[in-house]
Amino acid sequence: MAPKALDYESLNENVKKTQYAVRGELYLRASELQKEGKKIIFTNVGNPHALGQKPLSFPRQVVALCQAPFLLDDPNVGLLFPADAIARAKHYLAMTSGGLGAYSDSRGIPGIRKEVAEFIGRRDGYPSDPELIFLTDGASKGVMQMLNTIIRGPGDGVLVPVPQYPLYSAAITLFGGTLVPYYLEETANWGLDVHDLRRSVAQARANGTTVRAMVIINPGNPTGQCLSASNLKEILTFCYQENLVLLGDEVYQQNIYQDERPFISSRKVLMDMGLPISKEVQLISFHTVSKGYWGECGQRGGYFEMTNIPPESVDEIYKVASISLSPNVPAQIFMGLMVNPPKPGDISYDQFVRESKGILESLRRRARLMTDGFNSCRNVICNFTEAYWEMKDQKRVFHLRTTILPAEEDMPAIMDSFKKFNDDFMAQYEDYGGYSRM
Amino acid sequence: MAPKALDYESLNENVKKTQYAVRGELYLRASELQKEGKKIIFTNVGNPHALGQKPLSFPRQVVALCQAPFLLDDPNVGLLFPADAIARAKHYLAMTSGGLGAYSDSRGIPGIRKEVAEFIGRRDGYPSDPELIFLTDGASKGVMQMLNTIIRGPGDGVLVPVPQYPLYSAAITLFGGTLVPYYLEETANWGLDVHDLRRSVAQARANGTTVRAMVIINPGNPTGQCLSASNLKEILTFCYQENLVLLGDEVYQQNIYQDERPFISSRKVLMDMGLPISKEVQLISFHTVSKGYWGECGQRGGYFEMTNIPPESVDEIYKVASISLSPNVPAQIFMGLMVNPPKPGDISYDQFVRESKGILESLRRRARLMTDGFNSCRNVICNFTEAYWEMKDQKRVFHLRTTILPAEEDMPAIMDSFKKFNDDFMAQYEDYGGYSRM
């Protein structure tokens, strides 16, 4: 009998070709060992709550009240919830059309998109239009939708940094496009060399690929750098000259561990550059509730903002978003809370600041513990991260990628165990060449 | 200058060709009128909470506690939450790896998939394997993933009922496949005539299309019928003979408004048929928390169950699910609660039954009010719905599709206003031919 449609040999080839290392072989093997009773500390994916990070109290109080709106009529509600959480729950419930159980507009709740626009305006110093902001089930879903909109077939290429976050390679393969790699410069703080970019594009064109878009991950994942304003300017000029859409993955904008190099959004730099470029370069910027001191990965909340995208294309993007009806509503409220947190004078302000600072400072200490731990290992070099994480295997030198998320008190033991493994391994194999950078 | 990648003319053609009527022109025009101050009652999409349906208390209490787990340590928690909701919140939190803020396994939380398997086992009388159940962000996301896995290119066809739910036509176009229509028999209670199916397949083949899958919506959307066991048997035999994957959209299985024709799952009928068919036909069944008396659309929770799918294909489906990391965790808990509601003897049992029966009985009355209302209109015929909704335009006779979800107390006024519009319209235009079926 002929193979069936869901037999392996007859699946969509793009599905089969897709690789997704974050949950690939190593992850599956570790899961098996965990089932057998081995203690496994997962550092393959940024999942801070899974490693003990506590959620921020205020947003959880607000969303709990939105889930159980009947509590708002209970005379005892004030015993369990502060007055500003109660007020904020009412504020968001009034924006929905029937609470958390009703589909919202497929772009997300208008009132929350307005709060996101105000946040962007404050951050960048340029107003943002809520009609060009779409809420999504996590940033990944937004990235996938945009890539699916851009990629028409195998002749379409997307520039992706190496090392990268594997969402990009996976989604480009799944949608049948071509990944065009460009290399980040480890010796230049993982910055981008525009000459190198030009070379990548020229080579792709020589192979018949139409390069249509460029991904940057800023702050870097896994490389941890914040791109400078001048580097971003070069990149935007390059996109202008080469007629590329820029996809700016900015999900780590809260995870900044050094003060010298702040996060600057691509949109701000684009606006700063003025005409004609500020009105020409097509830019999609992504953000999430999963990272930073929020770490609300499991809620699946995110947004993308569109700059210089013509209205008829925005309509098409809206239409496709409509097919899955609406992003989940609870996470939309988390996004509202993230861009509009408690303010000085609010009852919950002090607690909110204490909790968020505590998380960020602990992450900074853990980045330091890990850097020092790796640098104490035989044949290992590790640069301090400016922002999120870390590095991966590249030519000659071996790279290793890890999150810095294990609990702070576990960190010394983890680094000791890595050092022991590494140093034994090196003692046995270093003659075969190679050393590691972290 | 050449068009940019996100200019309309250079978008992915499949994106542009995709049609999604539920939120198409009529919806956009209605939204405009609403903005201008007109009262609009949206009956284009099943969004019951938006039309005043209250959420069930128990699941909302449980999920609220899971969102705010610190309440579980508060001595006052018992003043706002019943003991069984508290116990159930602990039950689900213990299944997560870090609460609602942590990504789960990309297939969903194992403990909840086990509860879903137990529900299916009780419903069908055949055990179900949790490893073959994947939780999703609403049923739509699961349907889209499966279609993307099956469709390899424009030569691949998927049988879709007419009238259908527009998710199917939209997703098939988006993924570059070919929709092969088959017509439901209005005169046979919207059942399927297998001769008709054969004709559709033969015609598609003559056009060079490889038909690989068949969608059934049971209970029907928008047609409202429950397929009989014998009709399902014919369909499964047809899929066996024609080597088709069956995609069984069973999201309306709770919305049954007559007792004579109960819902029977495709999987139960397949198992009842015995060997060889029960081990041969590839079947994917979909369910959701958005419909029935739950109506938790905004939470975006669903699952699909795979029957007779080889392990290496399941692995591929798992890999693609991993790219967007995990379905949202709060909705996974709603799914757990839906398949495992309060039991007799539980503190919340009586309230839960009262609330869910109240919703279902009101829906039944509204179906009756709407049927009678339409039948009182000039030149209009409306069959009573067995399950969910309604009908759409087809050859000669005009069809109209509507939900039965407006608040019960608004129903008489809505039907009066429709009757007035219809009868005036008919008085003016009936000579031009045609009458309506609802």
Image (cartoon, coloured by chain):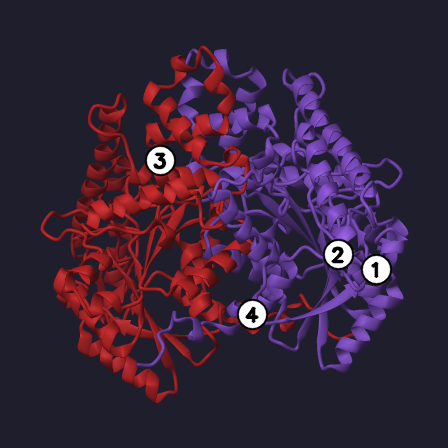
Chain colours: A purple, B red
The residue singled out by tag 1 in the image is A235
Q: Chain of mark 4?
A: A
The answer to whether residue B22 of the structure is visible from this angle is no
Residue at the spot x=83%, y=53% of the render? A190
Asked if marks 1 and 2 fall on the same chain, the answer is yes
Q: Residues within 10 Å of mark 3 (few under 14, many from 20)?
A: some
In the foreground, B132 or B376: B132
Residue drawn where x is 79% and y is 53% of the image: A436
**Mark-to-mark CA distance, 3 and 1:** 50 Å
Alpha-carbon distance for marks 3 and 4? 47 Å
Residue A17's label in the rendered image is 4
Measured in 3D between alpha carbons, the distance from the residue under mark 4 to the one under mark 2, in whole angstroms, is: 23 Å
Residue A216's disc is 2
Tell me, yes or no, whether dots 3 and 2 are on the same chain.
no
Q: Residues within 10 Å of mark 4 (few under 14, many from 20)?
A: few
**Which tag, 1 or 2, sits closer to the chain's start?**
2
Mark 1 Cα within 10 Å, few/some/many (few <14, many 20+)? many
* Kind of element beneath mark 3: loop
- Disc 1 residue type (three-letter): Ile
| Tally of numbered discs | 4
Residue A385 position in % (x across, y down): 80, 43
Q: Position of residue A87 (x, y in %)?
A: 55, 21
Q: CA distance from mark 1 to mark 2?
A: 9 Å
